[in-house]
Amino acid sequence: PDSTSPPIDSASSIDIDQVLEASLAEAISRRRNFAIISHPDAGKTTLTEKLLLYGGAIQQAGAVKARGEQRKVTSDWMELEKQRGISITSTVLQFDYADTTINLLDTPGHQDFSEDTYRTLAAADNAVMLEDAAKGLEPQTRKLFEVCRMRNIPIFTFINKMDRAGRDPLLLLDEIEAELELIPWAVNWPIGSGELFRGVIDRRTRNVVLFTRAERGRQASERHLHLDDPELPSLVEQELLDQALEELELLEAAGAELDLELVHAGELTPVFFGSAMTNFGVRPFLDAFLEMAQRPVARSTSEGPVDPLRSSFSGFVFKLQANMDPRHRDRVAFVRVCSGRFEKDMTVRLARTGKSIRLSRPQKLFGQERSVVDDAYPGDVIGLNNPGMFAIGDTLYTGSRVEYEGIPCFSPEIFSWLRNPNPSAFKNFRKGVNELREEGAVQILYDTDQSKRDPILAAVGQLQLDVVQHRLENEYGVQTRLEPMGFQVARWVSDGWPALDEMGRIFNCKTVQDAWQRPVLLFKNEWNLNQLLDDHPALELSAVAPVV
Ligand code: GDP
């Protein structure tokens, strides 16, 4: 070596921390995470398939369902799912598209939805509200929207099934504004509808995308041209174009602006029109969504907001799933990564207990398929083996202590006695009920009369009750009987037993207690609840269980 060469310039030596920070920032800026909220049959599965197609994650449409077939082989507790033709598990689908890593948090799409559906939204940075153009807002969409609103999640609206006769697009926008108090802003506007759905006009660029139906299984072709292109009139019926332009003028006259800050605050929803089935308008939607969607942002913790750029890893458990693979009788805890870089074999701390845990086999899930992950970034979801040590809402972290805001319980609407007709199975029965409660599968209440020790299952959807029964039988060997109770509303008494004692006898309501011996009132309907509140205006009630 040349002895005259200068010593290494310290200013040019690479600072490892800076490199790590830059790569973390880069990974975060490339990530988008969302969940689809919709009513069954609006087309969520179909839209998901089409989105994955653009991500190149699957080769042909139909693969989402094909994975469903494989599922039967790997999991027999999914019998229930098979019998009822529904999807119980909700996991995450990760795919890359146009330099972006997209995490699609899959919420189960059945009427009988469960608390899991709500909890998944706790891990989502954005929501896509999917509507059927012929139906507009439907009950389950409204419920899920309320959860998004509570958390100020940005909402993007996709109005689906435009290839079929539907409602007037302007009226669909009015409905969103009037009923959800959410300002709709159509990003693109349909040219024609039903058989005559020809394409969409991008309102910002005045570019037109025309669709041509594709053969089965192939991607529809799109033609892009400007609204002023002289060729346009020869490609689309003039009346359809005139009508679309007229409607666009009405929208402009209404005057709202596409303000991204309002979008990110969950107050304004960009709206898109399309047809998932024929793959019309899906790509324009995806492109605009990725441009406008919220990146992983700071989240509230006991120590104030934590930025995703915080160099130490942190995240929280939003869902537990038992026995995804019955051969291993395993349990998986789904963790939303919130800050820092997660690495395989990392040792993390569990905020609730302070225990250190080495995470040696973190998994990435793609539907039911799993592979071991080496690393993950804010916005991603990882699956951890969970031999009973994690609970819903748990925070995992490295570095200084943080604890994310818990995931709220939801007010149960369905109540049923759970009977165990076989006294010799009592031990297993009690163990199973307790474990399923801890896991968050269902809420459990008890009669105040000590002699009636059978638990009351309290859930937001019937599905949860069926799952509990099924799992008690398959995992704990206990056959049970459900005995529905005629209640629909539950309220926790904020000031506990003394407040109730003061009131004396209460009518049209049943007093029970939760697993922490706190009083809960059950009502047949809202009307009975309001009656009680009229009679006792000082009484403070809560629709959800207070955090323990
Ligand atoms: P999910 O219950 O929301 O997952 O709905 P699916 O994706 O399973 O769709 C429900 C039904 O609507 C299926 O028969 C689909 O083929 C159909 N469907 C979905 N998207 C469209 C669409 O854009 N146009 C039409 N005509 N039918 C659709």
Image (spheres, rainbow, N blue to C red):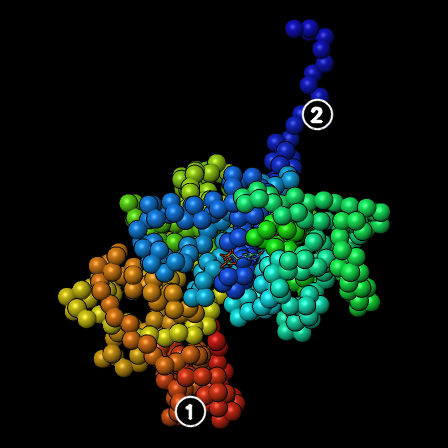
Q: CA distance from mark 2 to mark 1?
A: 75 Å
Q: Which residue appears farthest toward the top when viewing the image?
A: 2
Q: Amino acid at mark 2?
A: Ser
369 sits to left or right of 282: left
> How busy is the neighbourhood of tag 1: few (under 14 within 10 Å), some, or many (20 plus)?
few
Query: Looking at the image, which residue is at 34% across and 48% down?
Result: 72
Q: Earlier in the sequence, mark 2 or mark 1?
A: 2
Between 299 and 253, which is closer to the camera in this rendering? 253
The percent coordinates of residue 491 (x first, y second) are 44, 79
Residue 419, image x, y percentages: 24, 72
Secondary structure of the residue carrying tag 1 is: helix
Q: Viewer-proximal residue, 6 or 454? A: 454
Image quadrant in which you'd find residue 501: bottom left
Q: Count of labels shown?
A: 2
According to the image, label 1 marks what residue? 503
Figure check: 418 above or below 512:
above
Q: Quadrant of the N terminus?
A: top right
Q: Secondary structure at mark 2?
A: helix
Q: Nearer the viewer, residue 51 or 545?
A: 51
Q: Which mark is residue 266?
A: none
- Dot 2, crowdedness within 10 Å: few (<14), some or many (≥20)? few
- Is the distance from the Cβ of mark 2 to the nearest ligand 1 atom less than 8 Å? no
Compared across the picture, whether 238 is left or right of 422 comes to: right
Residue ID at (64%, 51%): 280
| Drawn side of residue 145 relative to residue 331, left or right | right
* Furthest-left residue in this view: 424
In the picture, measured across the screen, residue 511 lies left or right of residue 4, that is left
Residue 12 circle label: 2
- Residue 510 in the image: state x and y as whole percent: 36, 84
Do we see residue 468 in this rendering?
yes
Dot 1 amino acid type:
Met
Vertical order, 138 against 475 (above or below): below
